Amino acid sequence: MTPPTVSPLSWCALAVYAFAFALIAPAQESNRNAILILDASGSMWGQVEGRPKIEIARDSVASVVNNLPPNTRLGLMAYGHRQKGDCADIELLLPPKELDRAAFLEKVNSIVPKGKTPLTDSVRLAAESLKLSEAPASVILVTDGIETCYGDPCALAKELANTGIDFDAHVIAFDLASQEAASIRCLADETGGLFLEAGDSAALERSLQSTLQALKEQPSGASFRAMNATTGEVMSGATWKIQDTTKEKEVGTLSTPTGNANLAPGDYVAIATWTDKSKEITFSVSKGKQTPVEISFGPGTLRLAAAESRDSEPIDRHLNWKIYTLGENGETSDEPVVSKHARQPEIQLEGGTYRVTVDYGKATAQKDVILEDGAIENVLLFTGSGTISVRSERDGVASEEHRSYFVFPIGADGKPAGEKLTSSHAIVATFNIPAGKYLITAEDGPIKASKEIEISAGEKEDVVLNFGTGTVTVSATRGGEPLTTHRTFSIFTASEPDGKAVEKGHAISKEFILGPGDYIVRSEDGTQTVEDQFTIESGGSTEVVLNFTTGTVTVSATRAEEPLKDHRTFSIYREGETDGKAVEKGHAISKEFILDPGNYVVMAEDGPQVVEQPFSIETGGKSTVVLNFTTGLITISATQGGKPVETHGTISVHTADSSERIEASYAISKQFALSPGTYQVGFDSKDAKGTAEITVITGDDKEVVIPISPK
């Protein structure tokens, strides 16, 4: 069901009408099931007229329920009444059944507000409960707050409206600000229910009477349909306005071509509007009846096609078409009434004056058309464009690579515009552009190629851009010896040596294809950066060898002359700068460093012991440095009562006089590398501890077990 959008005045009229009917109409048999959902969120303890809102709600429900006929089928649901902060706190307290006033009010009075406002999920659960019956169904939601559990009430409303079930949701916004109330109004609007605002106890009671009265009667109103006179299909985009017979008072509106509106018995005028056309009809509403109201629009047909010129065949590809309404003074509608991507579409429109536009690539065309109701108009637009296909060659050989092509208009002064008209990335690029002069450009890495052309309407032209290139092969040596390791070579234009590299390659030896010009190649070998300048000529080739003056040093470590097989960090400093920043670092068992010629110091650690050793680097030289640690390895654990301790404790190593802690770790067992000497070691767990004295000598690899005792 697609609901109407009814003006606020009409909603008030509906509420008053429903209330009045409740006072004068006799009780009627009803098989409609309903569930009253009562908000029991914490905010219901707020006060209106000096009383908590929950007390006002209980009293209002009691007053209304005590006057309902016993055959009213009414259930009760609450949310937020059992615990705080729980979005799942929703409970069906009573299923819909013939009314037991005492039992119903006992449940109402037992509700104590505590929690959040999951109103969307509560309406969903109530609707699902009501679907168990084939009878028409309603939900009446009384809330003083908006959704606080991330639900989307409007999405749910649309979902419920589209089920096809006779279901409506009535919403009573109790002491809720207008802006907040608007966020939940959609529940009623989309399902055809009532939306009522209550600011005090009297208004709440009247609202409850109005919504519960709606359960007992078939509402009066009308159903609306705007349709195509030829096909009978709904006219998409049509809207409705409902007025009294004087046309001075608007009763309601529909923003869709079909829908329903609840109206008091009487005579009305309905005005249907589609595009810039409006038609009206007078109709009557009888008590408890739904009056069908239909208006037909007789569309004409536009058959659209486009060609590049008057001598060209119609364009046989999808184009972008738009149609605007055209006013008496030549002004067009802000938005198109039709927007379509098609070859030669047929468009049905109500008779009127229109402007048809078409886009073909970067060419456009338009035409104003007068369309009579039921007429067929053939509309042919001329884009005044030509078509160019652009490809590239390198030294006369066709390229099979994708590249970017750019099209710049050439002005009356013979100069290309600074801003491109269009571009494309392809092997062969096709452009549909207005007739005129253009500069076509492309790039192949740092190489640029261009060509000026002139194209006429309907003309097709092939454009070939030729890239003249040369090559450079780059490699490197160290101390005159060719390097056999991969490295990155970066190419810069000589005019922008600090700009962005035009080419890069990672290899032992790398060939680059470049356009004519002067360039710089740059690469690194360890701490040294070397560059050289070269020139490329079209069709030529050259070679550049970068010579590094670096040398290498390979660093490893031993403990008691035995090679260490665990990784550690080696830090390289320039001689005399060991307190400064390291020039190189590496974490490995054995690490090779590439360095500039000079004097250096290498440092590494083994536990608390730091060892350093100076060395020198010569161009092309290869040095080896072995750092020898005099440490020993001690593995510490603990026993208690003769049994190994299997729980974690703090394992610590202190100097012999216990004045300084050297190492500590929280573990069951821990290995430490220590310099030769005497130490106090300890194991301290939650319930026990102990200490022992140990002596470490170079090359040790032993276990120490500390007996511990309860604290």
Image (cartoon, rainbow, N blue to C red):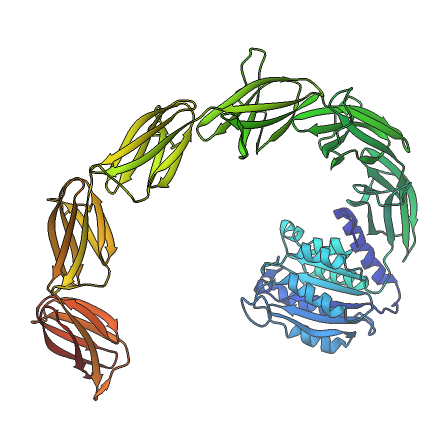
Q: Nearer the viewer, residue 539 or 148?
A: 539
Asked if one can make out residue 29 in the rendered structure from this viewpoint, the answer is: yes
Measured as percent of width and height from the top left, residue 188 is found at 73, 56
Relative to residue 287, is residue 356 drawn left or right?
left
Q: Quadrant of residue 199?
A: bottom right
Measured as percent of width and height from the top left, residue 15 is found at 78, 55
Quadrant for the N terminus, please. bottom right
Q: Quadrant of residue 174?
A: bottom right
Query: 323 above or below 192?
Result: above
Residue drawn at point x = 78 percent, y = 27 percent: 314
Which residue is most to the bottom? 641
Number of numbered labels in the structure image = 0
Q: Nearer the viewer, residue 636 or 252?
A: 636
Relative to residue 84, is residue 196 drawn left or right?
right
Residue drawn at point x = 82 percent, y = 35 percent: 346
Query: 247 above or below 6?
Result: above
Q: Nearer the viewer, residue 330 or 678?
A: 678
Query: 167 above or below 548?
Result: below
Q: Nearer the viewer, residue 46 or 116?
A: 116
Which residue is most to the top? 413
Asked if one can make out residue 199 in the rendered structure from this viewpoint, the answer is: no
Relative to residue 458, is residue 116 drawn left or right?
left
Relative to residue 238, is residue 590 drawn left or right?
left
Residue drawn at point x = 90 percent, y = 50 percent: 292
Measured as percent of width and height from the top left, residue 257 is found at 82, 45
